Image (spheres, grey):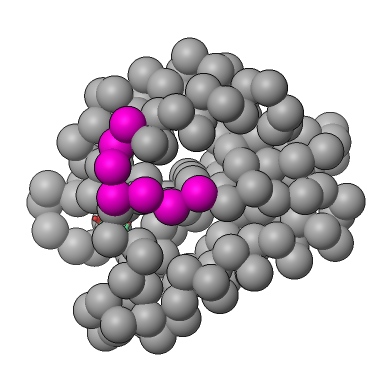
Amino acid sequence: RRLLLVNGPNLNLLGTREPDVYGTSTLADVERITTDAAASLGFEVRAVQSNHEGVLVDAIHAAREDCAGIVINPAGLTHTSVVLRDALSAVALPVAEVHISDVSHREPFRQHSYVADVAIVHVVGEGVAGYASATRRLIDVLTGHAE
Ligand code: DQA
């Protein structure tokens, strides 16, 4: 079985982007952490990152064909995108929402997530390790071991 890992705009710059907020791990590290966490529970991962909302929407639609769930860090689109939220609702796959930083203690405009109530797992402020915990929790749900 397979998961789709979606990383939104600017996350291609992880490692050099505001390292005091997001740390020094790279997108490649994030994809490896997620892949390893999934593999240890018998799942594969297909990873996509894009700075273009429509590319993310297309990847989410395609996940309907061959993925059991979606791990997503929508990045800035978290706080703006009805479109991304609608795509996630449309495919009706279980979703885990991850944020590297603790968005709950940042600017007011980061306090609202359009994705939160279509996700069943939420991980914030655990750094890039949060992708592993989100992946494990999502797989627990998929395999009937939790929630
Ligand atoms: C982020 C938090 C968002 O508010 C921000 O726009 C990002 C990254 C995070 O992982 O902490 O790009 O999703």
Q: Quadrant of the C terminus?
A: top right
Q: Height in image: 35 above or below 56?
A: below
Say if the magenta span includes residue 52: yes
Q: Quadrant of ligand 1?
A: bottom left
The picture places residue 3, in percent across and down from the top left corner, at 68, 42
Front-most of 104 and 55? 55
Q: Is residue 33 left or right of residue 20?
A: right
Toward the top, the furthest residue is 90
Q: Which residues are magenta?
A: 48-54
Which image quarter: residue 112? top left
Say if the magenta span includes residue 27: no
Q: Is residue 43 left or right of residue 72?
A: right
The picture places residue 108, in percent across and down from the top left corner, at 11, 51
Residue 46 seen anywhere in this rendered image of the structure = yes
Residue depicted at x 84% and y 33%: 144
Residue depicted at x 56% and y 75%: 29
Q: Is residue 118 left or right of residue 133?
A: left
Residue depicted at x 40% and y 85%: 24
The picture places residue 62, in percent across and down from the top left corner, at 57, 26
Q: Height in image: 18 above or below 42?
A: below
Q: How many marks?
A: 0
Q: Quadrant of the N terminus?
A: top right
The picture places residue 4, in percent across and down from the top left corner, at 61, 42
Q: Is residue 36 left or right of residue 31?
A: right
Residue depicted at x 23% and y 79%: 18
Residue 21 seen anywhere in this rendered image of the structure = no
